[in-house]
Image (cartoon, rainbow, N blue to C red):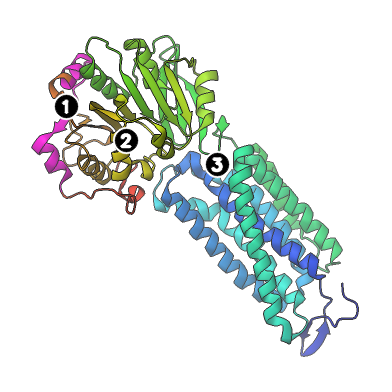
Amino acid sequence: MHANRPGPVRRRNGTRVPCAAMHRFAAAALVFVSSAAVLVLEILAARLMAPYVGVTLEVYTAIIGVILGGIALGSWLGGKAADHTDPRNLIGPLIVAGGALAFITIPLIDSLGAGLRGAGPTTTTILTFAAFFTPAAVLTAVTPAIIKLQLEDLDETGRVVGRLSAIGTAGAILGTFVTGFVLVAALPTRPVIRALALALVLLGLGVTVWLRSRRAVSGTTIVLVMLGAAFSFAASHPCEYESAYYCAYVQADEERPEGYALWLDTLRHSYVDLNEPSHLEFAYTAWFGDVITAMAPDGEPLDSLHIGGAAMTMPRYLRAEHPGSTSTVLELDELLLDLATDELGFEPGSDIEVVLGDARLSLSEVGTDTHDLVIGDAFGGVAVPWHLTTREFTEDLRRTMRPDGIYAMNVLDHGPKDFLRAEVATVTAVFGHVAVLGRANAFEPGGSGGNHVVIASDAPLPFDAIEQANRERRRDDRLLHGTALDDFVGDAQVLIDDHAPVDQLLTPFPTS
C-alpha cells in the first residue's frame, strides 16, 4: 500500500470519505486469478456436461454464450455494487461465493443432467445456465470492485482500467491454455473443479481478513460453501473412466455372460462378446458384417482400415471370421485402446495396428491403394466429427482404397435425416456407386431413425449379396440405392471443409 499516495474517495451522504487503495500488485493478482477461474470453469463445463448432452458444436455454443452472459452481468452489477459499497467489503466475499458456486456446479449438472439428456440447444443452454452462469457472474464482479478501489485519480482512470482489463484477459488466456492443454488431459474433471473451488474459498477468506473488511463473509455464504462441498463429493459420477475426449464406462450384459458394452458420453458405442468375437450385437455392426460377407463370402482375408476403434469390435470380427485379414485402426483416444485391452479382452497382434491420433491427420500417412475395406465408425457424442464427413476427407479416404474397395460408414440420424441425406450426397460426389442400409421403414416419411450404414465404391456394389447376407442373419432391413436413393437424398448439400454444419443438420434423438 502506498502511504504517501492519496487514497480513492467515495461520497457518503454528500461527504467525501477516504478509502485505502490496494497495492497494485495485489490488485493485479486478484483480477488475474478471478478471471482465470472463470475460464477454467468454462473449459471444464464441456467435460462435466458431456455424459448428459455429448460433445457437439451446440454444447460449446451454449457454454460460450452463457459464460459470456455471466461475465457481462457480473461486470455490470459488480461495478454498480462498488459504487454503493466499500469495495473492500465486496472482494473477499465475492471470491468465497464464487468458490462455493463452483462446488455446486457438480451436483447441479448431475441432478439436472440425468433428466435432461439430449444434445439440443435448449437442453444444453438450460443445463449450462443453471450451473455456470452465476459463478461466472460472481467471479467477474471481483474485477470492477478492484478497479474501483484502485481509482485514486481521475487522470489515471484510463490507465488503471486498461491495465487491469488487460491483466484479467491474460488470466483468462492462461486459464484456458492450462485447462485445455494440461489439466483436462492429466486429471479427472471433478477433482480439478473441487480444487479450484477450495482454492477460491480459501483465497476469499484470506482477502477478507487482509482487507479488514467491515462486512465479514456472511453465514449464508459459509453454509453455501459447506453444502456445495458436501453435495459435490456426494454427487454420483457417471464416468468410470475419463479422458480428454470421453467419459467412458463398461457395462456388463445380463443376457450374455461374456458380453460387454462400452459407453462413451451419452452413446452406447461398442459391444463385444469375449467368447464369441464374431457376434455383432448392434444392427449397424451386423450391417458392416453383411458388407464384409458380400465382399468375401468364403472368409477370404481383407485388408481393412478403420476410422475409429473404441472396443475394436470389427477388427476382432475380421480376425475371427476372415483369418489372415489385416486391420489398421485410426483411434483418437488412448484411453479407449487401454480399455479395449485391459477391460474388454482385446489382444493386439501383428494383424491389427492401432494408430493413435486424429483420423483426419493420421489418414495422410496411410498408403495409396492399400485397403479393400474402409469402415467409418467415429463419433464425438452422437455426431460424426464434422471434419470426417466432408468431401475433402472422403477424397483422401478414397485414395487409400483399391479400385474395387468398399467404404462403409456408420451414420446416426433421426427425424428428417438431413445429416444422413447430406452425407450420402457428399459420398456420392466422390464415389461412383453408393447405397444405404437401414431398417425396413427407415427411408419412409416418418420412418424409424437411428443408425444407417452408407456404402460406397468406385466399382459396382454387390447389392444382391449384401441383401442375401442380411436375410441370412434373419433380418429384414432395406438396402436403398439407385433412383430410390436419389429421391431420398433430393437436393441435400454436399459437405465441404468450408461448410459442414453437421450438428445443425443432425437430429440426434427421435422427434415426437
Residue found at x 33% / y 41%: 393
Q: Is residue 477 left or right of residue 250?
A: left
Asked whether 140 falls inside the magenta stretch, the response is no
Callout 3: 10 Å neighbours few (<14), some, many (20+)?
many
Asked whether 477 falls inside the magenta stretch, the response is yes
Which is nearer the N-term, disc 2 or disc 3?
3
Q: Is residue 49 left or right of residue 434?
A: right
Q: Which mark is residue 347?
A: none
Residue found at x 79% / y 66%: 25
Name the image quarter holding the C terminus.
top left
Name the image quarter holding the N terminus.
bottom right
What's the distance in space between the residues labelled 3 and 1, CA to CA?
47 Å
Q: Which mark is residue 461?
A: 1
What amino acid type should be assigned to the residue bearing mark 2?
Answer: Leu
What's the distance in space between the residues labelled 2 and 1, CA to CA?
18 Å
Disc 3 to disc 1: CB gap under 8 Å: no
What amino acid type should be assigned to the residue bearing mark 1?
Answer: Leu
Which is nearer the N-term, disc 3 or disc 1?
3
Q: Provide the residue designation for mark 2.
A: 397
Mark 2 vs mark 1: in front: 2
Q: Position of residue 485 (x, y in %)?
A: 14, 38
Looking at the rendering, the stretch of residues picked out in magenta corresponds to 466-490
Q: Residue furthest front?
A: 368
Q: Residue furthest bottom?
A: 14
Callout 1: 10 Å neighbours few (<14), some, many (20+)?
many
Mark 2 vs mark 3: in front: 2
Q: Is residue 409 above or below residue 353?
A: below
Q: Which mark is residue 110?
A: 3
